[in-house]
Image (spheres, grey):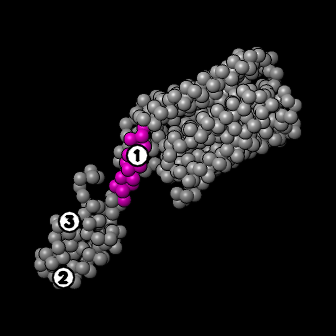
Amino acid sequence: MNKKANKIIFIVVYGLFLGFVLSFLYAGPLFNAMLQGNRFKNLFLLLIFLAALLSCAITAKFKIAPSGQKIRLMMIGNLLFSIGFYAVVGQTDNGLMLVLASAFAAFIGYSAIYVSNNLLIVARQYNAYENIFINVALIMLLANGVSYIVDVLLAFDLQKSALIFIVGSALSAIVLSSKMDFKFKKTLDQRLQLNKRDLYVLAAIILLLKVSEGVLYKIIEYGLAEQGNFFPCICVLPYLLALLAALYISYKIKRKLFAFLSACISLVGLGLLSLLISEDYIGLSNLFMHFGFGFLDIIIWGSIIYLTFVYRDENKTTATIMAFQILGIFIGGLIFEATMQQGKLGYAIAIISIFSAIVLVPKVNEITMHEIISDKEIVDAMRAKKERLKTRQKYQLLSTREREVVDLILLGKTNRQIAEALNIAETTVKTHCKNSYLKLGVKNKREIKAVFDERDGL
């Protein structure tokens, strides 16, 4: 299977599975629908959250190599345990069922993040360096499209239809994952050593923005509900529009890791300002904030894959950023629950969180600018070396005479000197040169010297 087909399959698999996860995990529409009024809801959320953090810790510490079989097994397990959780959660007054539901919840949190962490590492295999943010936008668009359909079905009280649809999405992802090629090429890894300061500053920005998101999403949701014109899936539509806009911008700017940050924070700030001016503007605030947080998700997921290109320790990269992201959302949700009766306090915490993120942005730019400039050169150099290695292997395809000519070219000999050394005509030397260029895939003597230059360490 060619690389393009692999990439398309990967995007669909990740998008469908992520859509399934978004519908079941923290604040997911199916999770909320099945646990409405359930007194154990917060317990299950806590177990999912803690198990997700444990999954991140194990990913970072043990560096388990991702494989198609492991990922598929975890996806199947997540699907089965999610259905099991759905089946027993209504009977949680029974002690045994409560224990069983708690075990299901913990496995759902662990396996979902395990699969995501591993797929983010595998993404390095399937995403071209230049198109990371484009592919991330497509994955997020598909994932949230799946979640949006679930929202619409639940809005019309079609709970069983929503469950069947989301299970079908997960099954499709599992089946398609068997079509992906997980054969990693063993090449010389010349990526940089992980710069922990870069990683933790970026993770801190994500944490702060996700805390703000956790608070503001709930404020908007409750505010729209109180106005009496709240349609449950209305909040998702601006987010999908944001992802479409992000997809277009990604196509234009490609490798700019932090290009979305200022736009993201500005849009969230405008949404918050609309709320502060008047709660009558909550619909406008919803639009601005979802656009801002849509851009933020592109930054988070794209930056993880970007950093797996740049740094060697991809397990720590994916686990750290994923852990800070889910930590931020959970903290934001808790803050909202604690300040629900004092709306202005929630706004204040969201403002402080966003302001702190703005303060850190220049620091991120300062410590990573030289790397962002040089990383393209590093990756491009790695690719050039791979091409040179392939060309060297083609040396075996040359005839004996052609090898003699190439060897003399590498010694810096002219065509006349080569002709004299081999006792052949100069026109014959030119013919051998042309044939050698064709077989090696080069254009001239300078390129032959560059290919066989031993100083590149291959």
Type of residue at label 3? Answer: Leu
Q: Secondary structure at mark 1?
A: helix
- Observer-nearest residue: 272 or 234? 272
413 falls in the magenta region: no
Q: Which residue lies under the disc numbered 3?
A: 410
Residue 44 falls in which quadrant of the image? Answer: top right
Sequence-first tag of 2 and 3:
3
Residue 166's disc is: none
**What is the C-alpha distance between the residues marked 2 and 3?**
17 Å
- Main SS category, magenta section: helix
Q: Which residue lies under the disc numbered 2?
A: 426
| Magenta part of the chain | 368-387
Q: Relative to 40, is 178 on the left or the right?
A: left
Type of residue at label 2? Answer: Glu
Q: What residue is at 65 percent from the left and 30 percent from the top? A: 213
Q: What residue is at 56 percent from the left and 53 percent from the top? A: 252
**What is the C-alpha distance between the residues marked 3 and 1?**
33 Å
Dot 1 alpha-carbon crowd within 10 angstroms: few under 14, some 14 to 19, many 20 or more = few
